[in-house]
Image (cartoon, rainbow, N blue to C red):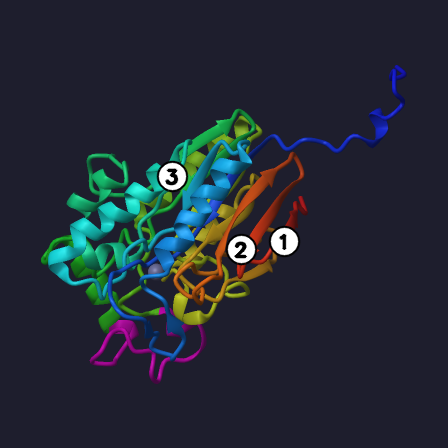
């Protein structure tokens, strides 16, 4: 059928939906510092980055939601100010007019136990875990993993999951300081106390979700604070059992993209099965006046990431 103005063929296809992204705000009202490796960290500036992100998301006026990839308050925040600090960051997210989906990171757990943190982030499963999924449109499903399900941080001392994590670290990391990778080789450098694993129950849940998504012909985006592919991340930042999680994911064809934070420099890879892995650059490491946040346009066959400042834009065309 012809069009009245003859321009139909030139029209740019609209995305199915769009969403905002930001990672590793790690705000604290403390002087600037440096990471273990000497990378500058701007603790007070990072909340300004978040404020500018929310402002952009609101101005765009076409986003359906935003995802926070974790670590909203830094572990150096004085403990008597943890609650106030986490609330302050959550309140900045609340200025966005659409829903925000949060996930937990190690720094969130240094500040508050799960019992206090999860209600603030509106993650309420009742069992203390922080994994869930949601469908913004019928054809797409987002899976948010809890990378600290098995972890030495966040669960009460003596909790079976704390014990399981400590036992694993004991075997895999002989250093007295379990946050030190000294002497660990290659991929074994991920066995550090500030990382964690997806537990057996969560793996089974993931399998069930992907099975359902496959039968509904949904495309899936997997989100996790901890990266899932060595090609996109330093070894020290990987999920302890990234291999087990990827084995479940590779059993199906529905997962197109995995998104994460935690490894502040950011990264991108395409794994052996054609799945994109994108790690977002940290808001914390933006020198004053610079930014790291963005938004994603979602299509049937691709995700287009539009980054601001240090967050690199990229086109994630599905390979299968
Ligand atoms: Zn982290």
Stretch in magenta: 171-190
What is the x, y in percent for residue 165?
23, 61
Q: Earlier in the sequence, mark 1 or mark 3?
A: 3
Q: Crowding at label 2, few (<14), some or many (≥20) Cα neighbours within 10 Å?
A: many
In this orientation, which residue lies closer to the viewer: 55 or 238? 55
Q: Earlier in the sequence, mark 1 or mark 2?
A: 2
- Displayed quadrant of residue 15: top right
Location of residue 117 with respect to 161 vertically, above or below: above
Instruction: Say which residue label 3 marks.
Output: 101
Quadrant of the image containing the C terminus = top right
Location of residue 165 with respect to 19 vertically, above or below: below
For the residues labelled 1 and 2, the Cα–Cα distance comes to 9 Å
For the residues labelled 1 and 3, the Cα–Cα distance comes to 22 Å
What is the x, y in percent for residue 78?
16, 63
Q: Crowding at label 3, few (<14), some or many (≥20) Cα neighbours within 10 Å?
A: many
Instruction: Say which residue label 2 marks.
Output: 278
Q: Is the residue under label 2 in contact with that under label 1 (CB below 8 Å)?
A: yes
């Amino acid at each position: 059928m012809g069009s009245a103005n003859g321009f139909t063929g030139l029209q740019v296809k609209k995305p199915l939906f769009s969403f905002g992204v930001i990672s590793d705000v790690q705000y604290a009202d403390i002087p600037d510092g440096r990471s273990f490796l000497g990378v500058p960290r701007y603790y007070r500036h990072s909340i300004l980055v978040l404020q500018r992100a929310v402002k952009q998301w609101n101005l765009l006026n076409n986003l359906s939601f935003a995802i926070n990839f974790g670590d909203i308050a830094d572990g150096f925040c004085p403990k008597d100010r943890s609650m106030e600090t986490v609330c302050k960051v959550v309140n900045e997210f609340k200025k966005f007019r659409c829903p925000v989906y949060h996930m937990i990171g190690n720094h969130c757990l240094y500040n508050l136990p799960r019992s206090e943190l999860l209600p603030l982030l509106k993650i309420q499963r009742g069992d203390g875990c922080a994994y869930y999924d949601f469908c913004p449109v019928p054809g797409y499903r987002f899976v948010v993993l809890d990378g600290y399900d098995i972890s030495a941080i966040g669960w009460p001392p003596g909790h079976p999951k704390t014990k399981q994590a400590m036992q694993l670290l004991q075997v895999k990391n002989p250093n007295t300081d379990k946050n030190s990778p000294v002497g660990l080789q290659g991929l074994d450098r991920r066995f550090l106390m500030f990382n964690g694993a997806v537990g057996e129950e969560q793996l089974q849940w993931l399998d069930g979700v992907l099975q359902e998504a496959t039968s509904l012909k949904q495309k899936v985006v997997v989100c996790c604070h901890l990266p899932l592919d060595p090609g996109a991340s330093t070894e020290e930042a990987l999920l302890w059992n990234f291999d087990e999680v990827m084995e479940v994911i590779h059993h199906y064809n529905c997962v197109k993209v995995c998104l994460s934070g935690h490894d502040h420099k950011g990264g991108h890879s395409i794994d052996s099965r054609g799945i994109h892995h994108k790690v977002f650059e940290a808001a914390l490491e933006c020198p004053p006046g610079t930014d790291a946040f963005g938004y994603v346009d979602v299509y049937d066959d691709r995700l287009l990431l539009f980054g601001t400042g240090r967050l690199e834009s990229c086109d994630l065309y599905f390979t299968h």
